[in-house]
Image (cartoon, rainbow, N blue to C red):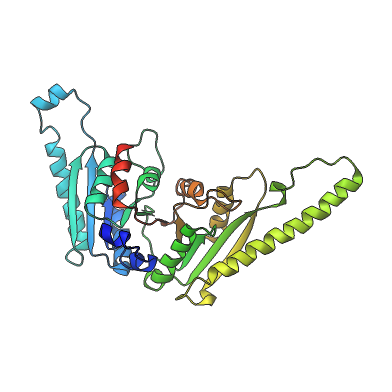
Amino acid sequence: MQIADYEKGSSFENIFMSSFKNWLVVADMTPGDYHLLSNVRFFADKLHPETLHIIHVTPKLDLPSSVLKEIADLNKPLLEGVQNRLEEMCKKTFGQDFKWKLTVKEGNALAEIVKFSTSKHVDLILMNLKDETAGQELSHKKIARKSFVSALFLPERPIRTLSHTLLPVDFSASSKKGQKFLDHWATRLGVEKVTCQHVYKNADWYMDRLFYSAQEVEQNLEQRKLLENKLYDYAAYKLSKFVQGFKQLDAREVKTLASKANKGIPIWQLVYKDIKKLNPDFITIGARGESRSPLVLLGSVTEKIIKAGLDIPILVYRDKKMPSRFLKLLTRL
């Protein structure tokens, strides 16, 4: 999409319909790449991207610059070996069914991926979802935080179905965009059921008071019970209004779940608990939520969820930002 399209105020629907055409697959040259490419093929068969870019970035050798000048091609055999191995895997996985391009280079992985994504107008970054390790140069947390496009984190196992999808909801613009993604792509993805899950805060978050008499304690309990009911009713009402935003999905395919968060319990733990209980096949979550609200802050919850060790594909959905902001992003890497 050109800058002029944004300047003209293109509608979200037009932007959305033109998205998810160019994908960037991040290979790390571990055994997990086999499942990564296989799962990319699984999604590609359903969403039909125009181009698959596969990239691997090898860190530069930690040697003095004077030494590197004398032996400039020290990494060349390694890069050629990686190129040949990945090319063989891509041919076997994608063949001629998809237009794919392979890039192998050295440098800072995160910086190179952001730059590459910018220059190739990437809509979606795909990488394996694995345990974070100390000092890891490239991680799903960094991609989720720094990337300017949507990111799909894939488990290191074969994906067989996406029948049940969970959409955490905080009623923000991000939640609505995640909703539009599912509404548009659910049929192609084979989604048969969507659960819109919202975590609301219980009365303890709003009634932090001390009571000294039996009468005050009794009054507090009555007020607390009334407030608890009102908070649940409000959450249920907001969810019922939210699901009306689905236009293509049948109402019978969309369920709702309102979960109460007790004070002192992190919101993300409630989301995680519901995920383990519902056992969905796929999670779609907004990159950011409302910043000044008693509602769930999906921005902070997102990072916790993708770090929680779930064995489920997770889509972190976000709009592509203005091209003028890309350089500002790069300067912060």
Residue 55 against residue 91 in the figure, above or below: above
Residue at x-position 23% and y-position 59%: 52
The residue sitting at 45% across, 59% down in the picture is: 284
Which picture quadrant has residue 209? top right
Residue shown at 12%/37% (left/top)?
76
Horizontal side, residue 314 vs residue 45: left or right: right
Q: Position of residue 193 (x, y in %)?
A: 49, 70
Residue 165 against residue 135 in the figure, above or below: below
Give whichever of 13, 300 is nearer the camera.
13
- Pick out the residue farthest to the left: 70
- Foreground residue among 130 and 178: 178
Location of residue 90 in the rendering, given as x and y in whole percent from the top left corner: 20, 57
Residue 213 place in picture, x, y as percent: 90, 42
Instruction: Count up the numbered dots.
Output: 0
**Residue 293 x %, y %:** 58, 51
On the question of residue 310 being in view, the answer is yes
Quarter the N terminus occupies: bottom left
122 or 274, which lies in front?
Answer: 122
Q: Is residue 30 visible?
A: no
Q: Quadrant of the C terminus?
A: top left
Q: Is residue 64 above or below residue 188?
A: above
